């Protein structure tokens, strides 16, 4: 068969498949955009686990009318300009792909207003086909509504699970952003009922408590250390509270939720002898380091990263938690045999 260049629309659908796996991926990308836009209030509303509808409203900086068409074009971003920027990104986004992907595989509405504009503007875009932008009344900030996700990619649509399952994935995506950004007031609504309503706070402990309640909040053990520009802060959870899986091991790198096998291993090591076989510790840890010490551009969802000093971070995490355990009287709670 002759070689042909793929059409833009096919290319976009392929790219969309990499970034948008399920409704929760939409929620993750839109939440990160709202945070990047400096929002202090974000409301997420979903219907049928996001399969029917996802709407996110923020009070961030908004998108100017002339930028709207670019915002939904792939590889268009306001966040980086050259390749060097890739190694110092401080924003969540930088690929300029999320909105292009989402609007290619759904029926979307973007409504936004910047502070220096008297009115807002609305862009309707259906399977990548944009309608003319119309003025509308709205407060400063952005609302993005996504309906019928995957309606034009039947294979993806078949892989959608029940609304209940999709909702729990969305709740997890929401949790990851909410835990990393306590300074932002955040609400999650599903089919008209409130799932989470979180007040803005300076305190990480308070946000964790609001999310998980007293069982966990009362058992947080603070940890903190800084070694050669790498700072580790947050909480491990008393070994009397454990889980049968690693889902509540929250690790944030420069406020971005990440998964890292080596660091999970360090955590397990730190709890050695304190937990029964098959039980896993909980943690809420924040690693902060200069952006040039880590490559976040290795995974489309940016869930995995590559550290320059992985070994040092492993040792630091292990040592910091161990030292904290040694100075905390765990024996009082009967975890240690002596
Ligand atoms: P990226 O986040 O990688 O830049 P996106 O496709 O997610 O790419 O977004 C494209 C652009 O649209 C962003 O760079 C930003 O300028 C703009 N944008 C998207 N969402 C918002 C929002 N909620 N508020 C303000 N601007 C936004
Ligand atoms: Mg983005």
Image (cartoon, rainbow, N blue to C red):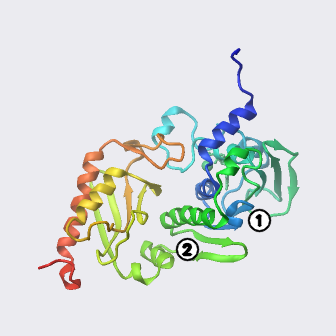
Vertical relation: 46 (above or below) 81:
below
Residue 166 in percent (x, y) is at 62, 62
Looking at the image, residue 171 sits to the left or right of residue 274; the answer is right
Q: Determine if residue 98 is in view.
A: yes
Q: Is residue 106 above or below residue 179?
A: above
The numbered dot on residue 294 is none
Q: Residue at x 51, y 62 (%)?
A: 176
Labels 1 and 2: the sequence-earlier one: 1
Q: Residue at x 29, y 61 (%)?
A: 267
Indicate the position of residue 105 as horizontal and vertical percent values: 73, 46
175 left or right of 238?
A: right
Classify 10 Å Cα crowding around label 1: few (below 14), some (14-19), many (20 and above): some
Relative to residue 7, is residue 251 drawn left or right?
left
Residue in the image at 61% along x and 49% along y: 21
Query: Going 18% across and 81% down the picture, which residue do you hit?
Result: 331
Say what secondary structure mark 1 lies in: loop
Percent coordinates x, y for residue 270 in the rendering: 24, 63
Cβ–Cβ below 8 Å for labels 1 and 2?
no
Is residue 228 visible from the viewing direction of this image? no
Q: Is residue 285 left or right of residue 20?
A: left
User: What residue does disc 2 label?
Assistant: 200
Compute the Cα span from label 1 to label 2: 20 Å
Q: Closer to the camera, 141 or 44?
A: 44
The N terminus - image quarter: top right
Along the line of sight, the residue nearer the viewer: 253 or 201: 253
Q: How many marks?
A: 2
**Which residue corresponds to mark 1?**
139
Q: Secondary structure at mark 2?
A: loop
């Amino acid at each position: 068969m002759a070689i042909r260049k793929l059409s833009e629309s096919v290319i976009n659908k392929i790219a969309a498949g990499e970034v948008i796996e399920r409704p929760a991926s939409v929620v993750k990308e839109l939440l990160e955009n709202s945070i990047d836009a400096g929002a202090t209030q974000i409301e997420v509303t979903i219907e049928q686990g996001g399969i029917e509808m996802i709407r996110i409203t923020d009070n961030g900086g908004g998108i100017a009318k002339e930028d709207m068409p670019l915002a939904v074009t792939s590889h268009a971003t306001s966040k980086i300009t050259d390749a060097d920027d890739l190694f110092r990104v401080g924003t969540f986004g930088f690929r300029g792909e999320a909105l292009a992907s989402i609007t290619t595989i759904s029926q979307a509405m973007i409504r936004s207003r910047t502070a220096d504009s008297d009115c807002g503007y609305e862009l309707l875009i259906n399977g990548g086909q944009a309608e003319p932008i119309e003025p509308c009344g709205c407060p400063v900030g952005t609302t993005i509504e996504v309906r019928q996700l995957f309606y034009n990619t039947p294979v993806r649509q078949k892989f959608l699970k029940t609304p209940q399952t999709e909702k729990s994935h969305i709740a997890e995506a929401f949790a990851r952003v909410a835990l990393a950004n306590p300074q932002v007031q955040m609400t999650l609504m599903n089919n008209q009922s409130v799932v989470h309503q979180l007040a803005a706070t300076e305190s990480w402990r308070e946000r964790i408590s609001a999310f998980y309640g007293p069982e966990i909040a009362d058992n947080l053990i603070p940890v903190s250390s800084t070694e050669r520009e790498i700072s580790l802060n947050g909480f491990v959870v008393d070994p009397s509270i454990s889980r049968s899986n690693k889902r509540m091991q929250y690790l944030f790198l420069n406020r971005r939720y990440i998964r890292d096998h080596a660091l999970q291993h360090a955590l397990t090591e730190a709890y050695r002898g304190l937990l029964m076989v098959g039980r896993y510790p909980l943690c809420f840890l924040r690693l902060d380091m200069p952006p040039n010490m880590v490559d976040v551009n290795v995974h489309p969802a940016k869930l995995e990263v590559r550290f320059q000093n992985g070994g040092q971070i492993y040792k630091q995490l292990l040592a910091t938690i161990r030292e904290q355990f040694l100075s905390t009287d765990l024996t009082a709670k009967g975890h240690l045999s002596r």
